Amino acid sequence: MEKKRILLIQNKKAGKHKNDENLVGFNAYHLGSIGVSITPDGKDALKEQLRIYKALGIEVIAICGGDGTINFVMSAVVDVYNEEPKQHLPKFAFIPCGTMNTIPRGCGVKGRAIWLLHNLVRKMDRGEKFEIARMNTIQVDGRTGFLFAGGMVSAFMDDYYGKKDEIVTPWRAFTKVFLNILLGIFRPKKFREKFKPFKGQLYVNNVAVYKGELSLPFVTTVPQIGFGAAPFNRVHEKAGHFQVLAFKKFSIWSLIREIPYAMIGTSNPYNGKINFVAKEVTFRSSDGTSMYYTIDGDMKRSESVTTTISAGPVVEIIQQ
């Protein structure tokens, strides 16, 4: 097989691919002779392809899709590269073709998808240096990603995604946030019924540090959450660590107070929060149910009443 330096993995179901059926072929053509494009159907097919290109010494894995695609592919890459013989992870390039693209922005990736792909190919072909961000990751239930959230956040994500055939857009997300803020102001009881908090214990290194209600529990290595809001200002504090940010008790007014601080990327001094960096945390549910959460936009239910998040590998992301 001819030596390739870039492996482009495309999700045909991502938002921009749905809107342009020719995009997959156009992106593949744009690689020229320096790379190869694949559109694997399912995890097993993806891992089979990754083993081939791992053996061939691929240098960059470019992921064309949304936040969920990035999480799906990165999880498979980490698994395959940890198989014997183990190898150092290749660099990653995010080509944002999803709806929100929160993860690429959180990793400092800016620009339109086609420009990013063109820049990647051009620089590699000319031997030019890339601008690289070294990003911490998290691992939970066999997935490797960047942004974990439970409680009211996962309930909101369900509300945002809606029915299967509904179209999800940034405008839809903004509208949902605005309407739910109004719901919290004028019908707080209804809001609490719709958006239930997590109830249980939080452990750090097997030591319980909090017991009770956590409305918005986040574990993250990226500063952003969407709409330009960047409430996680400690994600780069320590290599190989992540930030834990959670509200102990919640009211819609505490959320409204938080918004201005999040928009300028600083911390609200409100003392009803948990805010620290760690390498491993565990949430244990107190009501006997497993935790429902989102990781990089994908919805999952934990495999047991305990959900452990640990620090994953540090990955190199090509910014431009």
Image (cartoon, rainbow, N blue to C red):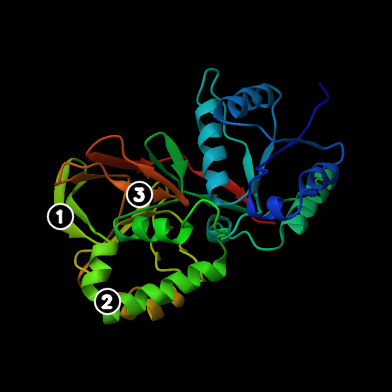
Residue name at image x 75 percent, y 50 percent:
120
Task: For label 1, count other residues whose C-alpha is less than 10 Å away and answer few (under 14), some (14-19) or many (20+).
Answer: some
Using the image, determine if residue 185 lies above or below residue 297: below
Q: Which amino acid does label 3 sit on?
A: Tyr
Q: Name the residue under label 1.
A: 210
Q: Distance between the residues labelled 3 and 2?
A: 22 Å
In this rendering, the count of numbered labels is 3
Q: Which amino acid does label 2 sit on?
A: Ser
Residue 65 horizontal/vertical position (percent)? 63, 49
Visible in this render: residue 266?
no
Q: Quadrant of residue 290?
A: top left
Given residues 194 and 111, the one toward you in this image is 194
Q: What residue type is labelled 1?
A: Tyr
Q: Which of marks 1 and 3 is nearer the N terminus?
A: 1
Q: Are marks 1 and 3 in contact (CB under 8 Å)?
A: no
Q: Name the residue under label 3.
A: 293
Q: Distance between the residues labelled 1 and 2?
A: 20 Å
Q: Mark 2 points at which residue?
A: 254
Q: Which of marks 1 and 2 is in front?
A: 2
> Which residue is at the far top?
84
Q: Earlier in the sequence, mark 1 or mark 2?
A: 1
Residue name at image x 53 percent, y 40 percent:
72
Q: Is mark 1 on a helix, strand or loop?
A: strand
